[in-house]
Each structure stands twice: as structure tokens, then as C-alpha cells.
Image (cartoon, rainbow, N blue to C red):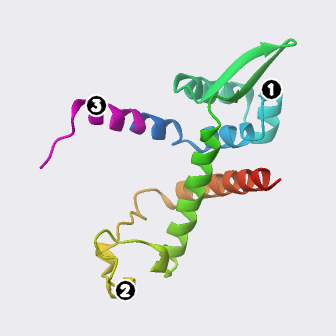
Amino acid sequence: MLGLTGSAERAAAAEAELFKALAHPARVRVLDVLTAGPASVTELCSATGLKPSHLAGQLSQLRAQHLVTGRRSEGRLQYWLSFPQIADLLAAAGSVLDARTTAGAGGLSGVGVPGADSVPLDDVPLDDVPLDMGSMADDSAAVLGESLESSARSYVSRTKD
């Protein structure tokens, strides 16, 4: 088995930390709201349905991962995405979930199997398809899927204008 180099290992660990920050539906909802632009705590609470104390904890974790930035402006604390690429990441996640949902519904034509480009996917045993549909509880996957799909729709509608 080939080991990762030190820098590749650090990069993989950093990516894992990024995905951990996105592993809670409330944080994804906050990021989704911020894809539209800066928002105050009051606006974030209203848009996400989170209580201020719960929002504060989620924002703290997002700030710790440098995904959001906050600053007081005109007496109000405003938050915004630290990097515009976060909106792209949410949209990409929505696309992956859409593809996974399609694959799970029996439409495996959009799912690639490494090294099997010339093999019709209908001929590939499902055990060989790199999907892990059961790693999340169904309700968690549904909540995450809805949140990411909402993010993707929001992002797509803004980029079309």
C-alpha cells in the first residue's frame, strides 16, 4: 500500500476538517444564506430558523474553519462567506447528491465506475458501484440533501442573472 507524502497527508487532513465543518445541516443552512451576501445575526436566525444561541455555536465553528467572516458594522454584527468558492462547493455537493439520488433510484447511467468506462453500467454488479448510500441515517441524508439542493438552486439562480 502506498503511503501519502507528508504534504498530501496534511492536505487530506485539512480537507477532512473542511468537510467536518459542513457535516451539520444548520451550518450548511447558514452558508446557504450567506451565498446571497452578508447577513446579520437577526437575518441569519430568521432565514435559518435557528435560535441565537444555537446560531452562535454554528457560527463559531464556521469561523474556526475560516469559512465565514464576521465584523461589526453600523452597530450590527454582519457575517459573510470568507471565500466565494464556498458557494461553488455547496453547488457541487448538491450536484453529487442529485447524481447519487438518481443512481439510488435505479438510474445508474450517470454514475462512473473507476476503470469501467467501456462496461455498460447495467452489467456492473451493484456491489462494485462506489456508492455508500447507507453511511448516513436516512433522515440525516434527507436533511443534508434538501439543504444542499436548496444551496445549489440558490447559487444557480444567482449566477444566471
Residue, disc 3: 7
The earlier-in-sequence mark between 3 and 1 is 3
Q: CA distance from mark 3 to mark 1?
A: 38 Å
Give above or below for 152 relative to 24: below
Give above or below for 73 relative to 88: above
Magenta range: 1-15
| Residue 120 disc label | 2
The earlier-in-sequence mark between 2 and 1 is 1
Q: Amino acid at mark 3?
A: Ser
Q: CA distance from mark 2 to mark 3?
A: 37 Å
User: Callout 2 environment at 10 Å: few (<14), some (14 to 19), or many (20+)?
Assistant: few
Q: Can residue 133 be seen from the camera position used here?
A: yes
Instruction: Please tell me whether residue 46 belongs to the stretch shown in magenta.
Output: no
Residue, disc 1: 40
Q: Amino acid at mark 1?
A: Ser
Q: Position of residue 84 (x, y in %)?
A: 65, 37
User: Callout 1 environment at 10 Å: few (<14), some (14 to 19), or many (20+)?
Assistant: some
Q: Secondary structure at mark 1?
A: strand
Q: Name the front one of labels 2 and 1.
A: 2
